[in-house]
C-alpha cells in the first residue's frame, strides 16, 4: 500500500479506447491498494491544433489568452478519464490547475510551478478512496487569477511536482517507449534498457537529445528526491503484475539507490550540429565576450565551446557549435562582428555530430575519456573538439561517423551487458 | 454611448476566419463608443464532439465530469476571440464561468444561473476600455467549486443574464437568421420579419417551435426587462451603421415599447405531433391523474390536453398530444393502464399537426379565434381539437393541411403587411 502518481502523455490518451486502456492501468494500481493521482496530457495532436488556431487568430498573440486556449486540451482528457474510471467502478474526480490549485509564476506559456496544494486530494484518498485525475501542463497565477501553462512537455513536470506535493512514493511516467536505453536502439540494436539511472545522468541524457522526459521534470525529481519510473503505456494493463518488484521500465532515482552502477550509463548523440572556428584571435580578456555577446543577442544557442591555451601567449583559436538550423545566422553574426573580434580567418563545418558519454561513475574513475579517444582513433574517427564535465564528455566528429562512433563507445563501455 | 452584450453562436465562431469577422463586429460597436461584453458559444460541432466522447467513455457518465469536458469548447473560442480583438488593437480579456464568477445551481448539465458578479468587468470598462469575452453556457457551483453547464443553447441565457448583471442597455444575439418572423418563411414566402415583439409573444413563439432563441433566455429577458435584439452574424461588419436607429433584426422587448402592435404577432406550427383520444371514461375526480400519472412516470411530454364537459355528467372523452417520437410508448403506457383508467376505446392518429396563433393583442380583442375557425373551415380544414390561453390558441389538424392552414391564417391576420 503506497501512494502513486501516474502520468500519461498525449499518445496514451489519443482516443476514447486508449483512455479506457489508461483507466485499466489505473484500476490495476487501485486494486493493488495504492492511492493514485493521475496526470494527463491533451489528446495527441490537440495541443498542436490549439496552438495553430492561436497563431492563425494573430501571429503576435497574447500569451495569457494562448494559455486559456491551449489548457483546454488537458481539461477534456481529465474529465474523460474520470468518466472512464467511474465506468470501471472506481471513485474518480477531475481537477484543473485552478481547482487544486497549482500555483505558478506569471510567465505565461512557460510558467514555473511555485506551489501545489495537495491537501484536498490526500483528504479524498482517505475519506473516499477517490482517484484524482489532474490536468497536466497548467496552473493558475495567484496574482491575476489567470490560467497559465508550463510550456511544451510540461505535463511531466506537473506529474513530478504533484508527486512531491502529495508525498507520493513514486511518480510513474507512462510513455510510448518502455524506458531509458543506454543509447538509441535504432543505431545500436544491442542497446539495453537501464533498470535504474541516477537523476544526474538522466539530466545529461535528456539534455543531450534523449527525448524521453522533459528536462525540468528530472531536475524537479532530483531536488525532491522523487523516484520517477519511465514505463510503456502500450503494455496491456492485464499483463502487468502490480506486485512485481519492478515491472519493465527504468527507475530514475538517487545515486545511492543504484547498487551496481556502471562507470558509463549511456551514450547520447546529436547530428544537428554545426561548427565554427574563429582563427588567430588575440588571447586577451574580452575576446570571448565579443564573440558570444552578438550570438546571444541574436538568440542563437551556443553549445560546445573549446578554446586552447595559446602557444605563444598572443593569439589563439576558438571553436564553438550551434544548432545546424542557426548556422547561417551565426556565421553572418560573427562576420558582421569581425572588426570587434579581430580574427584572421573563419573555418566552419555543418556536417558534424556531437557524441556524449555520460556516467556519474566517471567521477571516481580516471581514464574513462582516454579509453574513448583511443577506441575512436583505432576506427580512424577524427576528433575535432572535446569538452568535458564532471559526469560527461563530448566529442565533435564528422557526422558520417556518428553511428560507428556510438557503436564503438557502446561496446567499449560494455553497455550491452546487463 | 451605452453598454452592450453581444452574443455569437457556434456557426458564427466556427473557424478562425469567422472569429475574426466577429471581432470586426465587436470593433464596430467599440468604435461607436460602447462598453462591450461578448458571450461566445463553442465552435459549431465542437460541443457535439465532446458530448459524443463522454458518451463513448461511458454511457452512464457523471454529469460533473461531462460539464468539465464540454465547457472546454467555450473556453477555446473565448480565448481565440480575445486574441482576434487584440489583433485589431482592442483591449480584450477572456473570462471563464469560474473566473467572473457565474454562480449556478449544482444541477450539472442543466444548471440554473444564481448570481453573476459583473463588478470586475464594469471596472475594466471604466479603467481600460477593455472588452470582456465571456465563455457562454457555463458557470461554477459555489458549493463544490465544480464547473457547471446550463444545457444546450445555454449561451443565450448566459448572455441575457450577464446583460442584466452589468446593467447593459441591450443584449444583441447574433445568429444565423436575421430576426424573428411572423412564421416560417419556407412555408410562407411572404412571412415578414418583425421589428419588435413582446417578451410574452416571443416566449410562446419560442416554445411553439420557432428555434431562434433558447426559451429560458427570453424568460430571463422578461424578468429583468432586458431588451434582446436578434440579428444576423453574417452581415458584413463594415456594412452596418452602428448609429442607425435600428439595424436589421428583431427587438424583443416589453409590450409598452411596441407602439403599433398587431393583434396577432405570429403563427407557429409543429408537425411532430401525435394524438391519442381516450373514449368513454368516467367523468369523476382522479381519471385525469390515472392517465397522466403513468405518462409522466414514463417521461413522456404531453402537450395539448382537451377534455369536454360531458353531456350526461357520466362519461366523457379526453384527447391529448405527445411528440410523434413518443407515440408508441405513450400508446403502450395507456393500454397497460386500461384497468385503472377504465376507458372503452382508444383512438389515435400520428399524421396530425399543431398550428398556433400568438399575439398578446388578443387579450383586448374578442373574436380573434372565431375568425380563424371560419377561415379554416372555408378551406375545408377540419379542426380535431382546440386549446387556448390568454395570448395564444392552437388547433390540431391533419398534417397534410399544415402549410395551407399556416398560409391561410397568415393572410387572415394580415401578417404579411408591415
Image (cartoon, coloured by chain):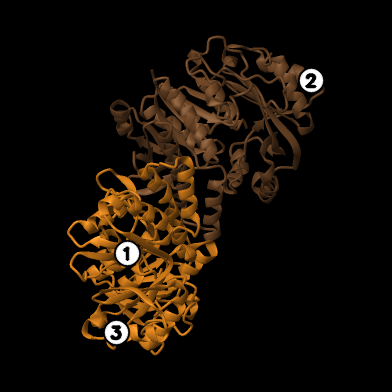
Chain colours: A brown, B orange
What residue would you read off at disc 1? Answer: B320
Q: Which mark is residue A377?
A: 2
Q: Chain of mark 2?
A: A
Say which element carries label 2.
helix
Rendering quarter of residue A384 = top right
Instruction: Using the image as rendered, state which of residue A317 and residue A306 is in the foreground.
Output: A306
- Labels 2, 3: front one: 3
**Figure quadrant of residue A365:** top right
Where is mark 3, residue-wise?
B370
Q: Chain of mark 3?
A: B
Q: Which mark, by number, is residue B346?
A: none
Chain ID at mark 1: B
Residue B125 showing in the rendered view = no
Q: Above or below — where is B338 with respect to A163? A: below
Q: Is residue A241 left or right of residue A131?
A: right
Q: In the displayed image of the protein, which residue is found farthest to the right?
A: A380
Residue ID at (62%, 32%):
A209
For discs 1 and 2, the disc positioned in front in the rendered view: 1
- Image coordinates of residue A183 in percent, x first then y, are 66, 24
Amino acid at each position: 500500500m503506497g501512494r502513486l502518481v501516474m502520468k500519461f502523455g498525449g499518445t496514451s490518451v489519443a482516443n476514447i479506447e486508449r483512455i479506457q486502456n489508461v483507466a485499466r492501468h489505473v484500476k490495476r494500481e487501485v486494486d493493488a491498494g495504492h492511492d493514485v493521482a493521475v496526470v494527463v496530457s491533451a489528446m495527441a495532436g490537440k495541443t498542436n491544433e490549439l496552438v495553430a488556431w492561436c497563431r492563425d487568430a494573430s501571429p503576435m498573440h497574447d500569451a495569457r489568452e494562448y494559455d486559456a486556449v491551449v489548457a483546454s486540451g488537458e481539461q477534456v482528457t481529465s474529465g474523460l478519464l474520470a468518466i472512464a474510471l467511474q465506468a470501471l467502478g472506481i471513485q474518480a474526480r477531475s481537477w484543473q490547475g485552478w481547482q487544486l490549485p497549482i500555483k505558478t509564476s506569471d510567465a505565461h506559456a512557460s510558467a514555473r510551478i511555485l506551489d501545489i496544494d495537495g491537501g484536498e486530494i490526500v483528504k479524498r484518498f482517505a475519506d473516499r478512496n477517490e482517484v484524482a485525475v489532474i490536468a497536466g501542463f497548467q496552473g493558475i497565477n495567484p496574482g491575476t487569477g489567470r490560467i497559465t501553462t508550463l510550456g511544451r512537455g510540461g505535463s511531466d513536470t506537473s506529474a513530478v511536482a504533484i508527486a512531491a506535493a502529495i508525498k507520493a512514493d513514486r511518480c510513474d511516467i507512462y510513455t510510448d517507449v518502455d524506458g531509458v536505453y543506454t543509447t538509441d536502439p535504432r543505431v545500436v540494436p544491442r542497446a539495453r534498457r537501464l533498470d535504474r539511472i541516477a537523476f544526474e545522468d538522466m539530466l545529461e541524457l535528456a539534455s543531450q537529445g534523449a527525448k524521453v522526459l522533459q528536462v525540468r521534470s528530472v531536475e524537479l525529481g532530483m531536488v525532491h528526491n522523487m523516484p520517477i519510473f519511465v514505463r510503456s503505456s502500450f503494455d496491456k494493463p492485464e499483463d502487468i503484475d502490480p506486485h512485481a518488484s519492478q515491472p519493465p521500465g527504468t527507475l530514475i532515482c538517487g545515486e545511492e539507490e543504484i547498487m551496481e552502477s556502471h562507470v558509463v550509463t549511456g551514450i547520447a548523440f546529436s547530428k544537428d550540429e554545426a561548427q565554427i572556428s574563429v582563427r588567430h584571435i588575440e588571447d586577451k580578456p574580452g575576446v570571448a565576450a565579443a564573440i558570444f555577446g552578438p550570438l546571444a543577442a541574436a538568440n542563437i544557442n551556443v553549445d560546445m565551446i573549446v578554446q586552447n591555451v595559446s602557444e605563444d601567449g598572443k593569439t589563439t583559436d576558438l571553436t564553438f557549435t550551434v544548432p545546424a538550423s542557426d548556422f547561417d545566422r551565426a556565421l553572418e553574426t560573427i562576420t558582421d562582428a569581425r572588426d570587434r573580434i579581430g580574427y584572421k580567418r573563419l573555418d566552419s563545418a555543418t556536417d558534424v555530430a556531437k557524441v556524449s558519454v555520460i556516467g556519474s561513475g566517471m567521477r571516481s574513475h580516471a581514464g574513462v575519456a582516454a579509453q574513448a579517444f583511443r577506441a575512436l582513433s583505432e576506427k580512424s574517427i577524427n576528433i575535432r573538439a572535446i569538452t568535458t564535465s564532471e559526469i560527461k564528455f563530448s566529442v565533435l566528429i564528422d557526422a558520417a561517423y556518428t553511428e560507428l562512433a556510438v557503436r564503438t563507445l557502446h561496446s567499449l563501455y560494455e553497455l550491452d551487458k546487463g
